[in-house]
Amino acid sequence: VYGRGLGVQGGARVHVAGSLLAESTEVAAFAVGDGSLIEGNDLVIAGVRAAAGGFGLGVEVGDGARFDGARVAVASVGGAAILALPGAARAQVRVDDLFVRGVRPSTVQIDDRGGVGFPSGPTVAYGLHAGAGCAIEAARAVIDTGDYGVFNASGAVRVRVGVIARQRQAIGAFDLGAGVGRG
């Protein structure tokens, strides 16, 4: 059973301002496919419930899609607040004034091609996750309470002026490849 809040694909674009995406199931906002774009200003994402497979993500972009936001808050999600995943093309995220709190551990798993799976293995909780070749840039960011504030899986993550606190596994960043930028 799915109850996704907002989704775009196939090159579609949407602008959301002054909005609350609450109590979605599996993912609150997702963009998939080259040219697909979600612009979110003054956006709050909260209370994303786990699907049958175990995860309830905040924002997921993949396969060439983009998420651009300003004044975005993501709270009480399962598995990850923001994911940028590869596919035929690389996903990109840019957020100014980002607040993340309460990423709950979940059984989300990401394969080498950027697919999100439903494993039965260990649980994780990512603030920001950049897959291979993908990019996440956040300015004025607070990431509070989870497992990994930043998980960089051969992508690029840049956090300018940020606080990452109360992470269970890694207080700053866990890097699997390309490096975590600091400004």
Image (cartoon, rainbow, N blue to C red):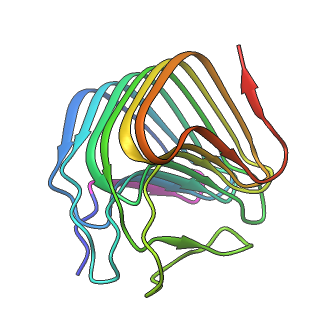
Q: Position of residue 60 (x, y in %)?
A: 49, 54
Q: Residue 182 magenta-drawn?
A: no
Would residue 69 be visible to someone looking at this image?
A: yes
Which residue is the extreme one toward the bottom?
A: 120
| Position above or below: 161 against 19 | above
State which region is magenta: 5-11
Quadrant of the rendered structure where residue 156 is? Answer: top right
Left or right, 64 with reference to 146: right
Q: Is residue 9 magenta?
A: yes
Would you say residue 127 is visible in this rendering? no
Q: Quadrant of the C terminus?
A: top right
The residue that appears at 43% across and 42% down in the rendered structure is 167
Name the quadrant containing residue 182.
Answer: top right
Q: Is residue 86 left or right of residue 47?
A: right
Across and down, in percent, residue 26 comes to: 31, 67
Is 60 or 146 nearer to us in this picture? 146
Relative to the observer, which residue lies in front, 155 or 151?
151
**Residue at position x 23%, y 65% in the image:** 25
Quadrant, the N terminus: bottom left
Q: Is residue 96 above or below residue 64?
A: above
Label total for image: 0
Residue 114 in percent (x, y) is at: 66, 67
Q: Residue at x 36, y 68 (%)?
A: 106
- Tell me: 35 left or right of 29: right
- Locate residue 85 relative to residue 29 in the image: left or right: right
The front one of 20 and 118 is: 118
